[in-house]
Image: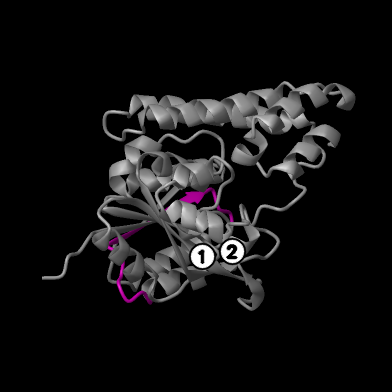
Amino acid sequence: MTARLSLSVALASYNGERYIGEQLDSIARQTRLPDELIISDDASTDSTPAIVYDFAQRVPFPVRFIQHERLGSTRNFELAIAECKGDIIFLCDQDDVWYPNKAETIEGVFISTPEAGAVFTDADVVDENLQPLGSRLWRFFRFKSEEQAQLAAGDALGVLLRHPVATGATMAFRSSFRDFVLPMPPTWHDAWIALLIGASSHLVALPTPLIAYRQHGHNQIGIRRRGRNRDKAVAEIYEPQVLIYETARARLLEFGGRFPIGAQGISRFDEKLAFLRAGAALPHARWRRLPSALRELLLLRYHSYANGLSTFCRDLFG
């Protein structure tokens, strides 16, 4: 008998009338249908609810539509995840399109790799009309072959402490981790989930694109743009990250009995935090930053926990 897991889809919606119908239809065309679809709606004022209710009437799996006050993307996903009952929770954006074999392929990875806590994939980047933009998602995230090999070898934490590489729209994780990742701090939900699961479990990266990742200029999240921190002081870039990593470290210690990370893993978090705190403490005057930044460079922390010399130069001259 072929093994089978129960699959939940957690979709966060907000004024999605233009694209959500295509996304819902792509879920309904899966070669392996989900066992439930949970849609958490962030106070939409357009026809999103009507589209969802119509969809729910014509599919053979349960659809729950939860409406609430405006909470923002991270909290919206948190509410959807909390309501999922399946063994595997798929994260889903409202404006993408799933390829027909997505659910079946990812379920197969979880069945064949019992140690896998989460799976994420590459994606085809497309425009608002689903026309290819000639690139894959991992290229935008600079998730290079060397890091892919590092992650495949079991060192997901080493990659994720340097930069996020997993996009929630391509990700699924075992529901046994739900209490571990919830509640989430005010940060990108996908980076948070991947970091905690990657630190304490096996993270699988599939190079096959299984969705069309739509960019249309109004994405709630979308591809994170270069230069988005251009107008921020250096300390302002680091300060929120200090809070996030302090929260992650505390969560890992709290759940250490269920999801052990070990002393070496905690030590790596401490090194990351030391780097972030040094960045948060950089003076406003550029000429006074050199001693601290140079120390972090010589300790190789800019290469282990950021983008090397490019981040070093940003911190000196930004």
Q: CA distance from mark 1 to mark 2?
A: 6 Å
Residue 282 falls inside the magenta stretch: no
The image shows residue 156, relative to residue 18, as above or below, that is above
| Rendered-image quadrant of the C terminus | top right
> Total label count?
2
Could you tell which of marks 1 and 2 lies nearer the N-terminus?
A: 1
**Colour style of the rendered protein structure:** one colour
Secondary structure category for the residue under label 2: helix
Q: Which residues are magenta?
A: 29-45
The image shows residue 317, relative to residue 46, as above or below, that is above
Which residue is the extreme one toward the front?
298
Q: Residues within 10 Å of mark 2 (few under 14, many from 20)?
A: many
Depth order, front residue of 65/305: 305
User: Could you tell me if the residues under marks 1 and 2 are in contact, i.e. CB atoms within 8 Å?
Assistant: yes
Q: Position of residue 97 (x, y in %)?
A: 50, 70
Amino acid on which the number 1 mark rests in the picture? Asp
Depth order, front residue of 226/54: 226
Residue found at x 64% / y 57%? 223
Q: Position of residue 246 (x, y in %)?
A: 52, 25
Regarding residue 173, the answer to whether it shows in the image is no
Q: Position of residue 215 (x, y in %)?
A: 65, 65
| Rendered-image quadrant of the N terminus | bottom left
Disc sitting over residue 122 in the figure: 1
Residue that carries the numbered disc 2 in the rendered image: 137
Residue found at x 27% / y 28%? 257
Q: Residues within 10 Å of mark 1 (few under 14, many from 20)?
A: many
Amino acid on which the number 2 mark rests in the picture? Leu
Residue found at x 58% / y 61%? 138
Secondary structure category for the residue under label 1: strand
Q: Quadrant of residue 71?
A: top right
Depth order, front residue of 5/253: 253
